[in-house]
Image (cartoon, helix red, strand yellow):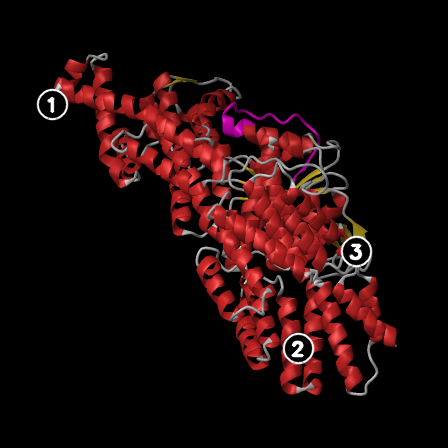
Amino acid sequence: MPTYNSPRPIEVIGQSASFQKLLRMVERVAPTHQTLLLNGPTGSGKEVIAQLIHQLSVDPHAPFIDLNCGAFPEHLVEAELFGHTKGAFTGAQNDRMGHLEMVRKGTLFLDEIGEMPLAIQAKLLRVLESKTFRPLGGSEVRHFKGRIVAATHRDLFAQVKAGSFREDLYYRLNVIVLELPRLSQRVEDIPVLVDHFSSSHPQPLSFSREAIAYLQRYAWPGNIRELRNLIERLSTLSDSPHISVEQLHSFLPISHTEVKVSSDLLADAMLALPAKDKLAAAEQIMIERALERTSGNKTAAASLLGISRKAVERRLQLRAERRPSAVRYLLKGQSLVQQNSYLAAIQSLNDGIVLLDGIAMDDEIRALHYSFYRLLAVSFQNLYGWLNPHAVENHRMAVALGKKLGDEVELICLQFWSWPARLASMELQAVRTLSQELLQLGLTEKTTYIWEEAHLAMASARFWAGDYSETLIVLERGQLLGERQVLHDTPGMDLMGQALTLEGLAAFQCGDFRRSGMALSQLLKRANSPHSEVLQRVVSLLGIVWLTFLFEDFQQTKIFSTELVTLAQAYQLKFYYGLGKLFYHYVTQDQGDVGKDIDECYQTYLSTDGGCLYHTLYIWLRGEIFLASHRPAECLLLIVQTLPVLSQGQGRAFISELFELQARAKAVLDGNLLAESAYRQAISTAELLGALPAQINASVSLNRILIALGQPPETASLRLKMQNAVGGEKDVKLLVRAQQILDQY
């Protein structure tokens, strides 16, 4: 049954870094009305944290109601949540208020949300979105005024993929997630927790130093609950209040000996190292241990190891000589990356790594390797694209080393740093999940650039999914728009340039041409600034090229794509060179075999290392060329083959344009009568995605066909679409075409 708690002090115990991080997050989110998700293993204290959140909330005197979603059958869970009216089901003899109403302005804690039946999940989602609900059997709409804190020990994302948890509810709950650490991740808190639990008994227990150490080595699969239960058993059954290791053995046996565990962990750690580091690490460990046992006496250490003193000195000298030189190569590589000289940076960084060969991998050397691999990944990505094999491998190496360094913030940022690669592969759901993780880190650490990059990633995923209006909302939420400059703490990325490009593209698709034009103006300003860095200019130029193409200002597209190609070629940025060439070939259709040029460009520079992110754009351009070259059958075949593939994936951006192009190809091939249905399909698809330009273009063509067939045009619908558009300072060509139709009737 649920519990109804009046306000009382909630005592939380722990000084470990992981637990204090959790408490800082609690302090930040508790005064808000945001829905929260607590994620942690069984017994980690999720209910205690939920109660603490309530205690620190705006109205701690309001009810706190706890409902275990897995403890009741489906119909009872629904009745408990929503309440019911008399006669709603067998046994409902009176009206009964549900927890959603009883909680008033308090906190409703939904424990084990992963166990909630799918049918109830849909109703809960409506509550979260509309803040309203209806009791079972009732018609009156009632308002939910409280806050929901959900909790789970399950992997909800895995449940989404398995079909047992709704994806929309998952993303609604996954905005702010509080991760509760395992007890094994906060072993420094075990002594104070032991004191806390034992002090509540008539005869408090005392633990020897060895016993505490024993408890800190234990795995604690049952977490804090298991520790508390152990103290209960010891208090009841132990013959003495003084607890030794020997006494613990009978209450808390460990399946493996400490020696076995330690040796296994050590061996596994060394086996996980790169091939060239395995034996060096083992050698270094033995040398350091021998020196410890001999109080630093190299002769005695050499004797203990069975090697000569010179061999020990040689190995120690190797480290002393090579490390400073490796650091110099690293600093040179960093400087070259900042100068966008990525090929030279790669050479310097690889030279530094070679110097470290044969040196044992302690934390100092590991940190150097980490920095080398991270910068190598940046360099390869900007040169060749996010999916370049060298970029992927160096990023993987950096992550593996970062895990051993223990800097949680840095590691999460590095792991998240792979989001452009996921985006390039059109793994949009994975990008959304990663962005949520980074967003949470930004809230916890109060780090601005983390917050900004998380929103940029989320906005990118939304755009390529075809959620154009949501893209703008996410950009605004992340404060990425306006005059304020975004921080540039992420190596090899230009957050501001990407944000402006996304704003321009999304605004154009929403029909806000004025806003799109303003984004274009800001990109022009950044590209032409004398203080612009190379990467800033390249990213800004790409945005300019793309937007001028959408505005059908092909002369400007030609000018700026030429500039982009020239700049990218000068700095050997092959990925950006390929994107520039793609647009350049399209706007120079009178020069050579343009279709072949675009094919080669896409295959050479984008499809291999750039993934499928720009595939829709490539098909669009390729199809337009087919149609302009009086090859409508090839255009239609290309689109017919492409649309089913695209519809199976997660990407929806620019699909509306393909449907509109398909309708134009059918009009040429099959005549106006058969093309009418194709244009109507294009309009409905564009309306579904909210792509106003495709709606207007398809409506213009549909009206021309209707006029040619002697049928009355559908000007009312076209006029309505025109009213939804926000024009710019200069005429937008698609609006001009639409107005010409309207002026005739």
Q: Provide the residue designation for mark 3.
A: 728
Residue 244 x/y as whole percent: 35, 20
Three-letter code for the amino acid on which mark 1 is drawn: Gly
Q: Kindly identify the residue that appears in the image at 77 percent across and 85 percent down.
A: 708
- Disc 3 to disc 2, C-alpha distance: 27 Å
Residue 67 seen by the camera: no
Which residue, given by chain and number where applicable, does mark 2 sit on?
Answer: 664
Instruction: Using the image as rendered, state which of residue 198 and residue 735 is in the foreground.
Output: 735
Kindly state the secondary structure of the residue where label 1 is placed: loop
Which region is colored magenta? 1-20
Q: Which residue is mark 1?
A: 306
| 719 left or right of 73 in image | right
Horizontal side, residue 340 vs residue 389: left or right = right
Q: Amino acid at mark 2?
A: Arg
Eye-nearest disc, 1 or 3: 3
Mark 3: give few (<14), some (14-19) or many (20+) Cα within 10 Å: some
Q: Position of residue 641 (x, y in %)?
A: 52, 75
Q: Residues within 10 Å of mark 2 (few under 14, many from 20)?
A: many
Residue type at the position of mark 3: Gly
Residue 278 in sight? yes
Q: Does 268 sit above or below residue 663?
A: above
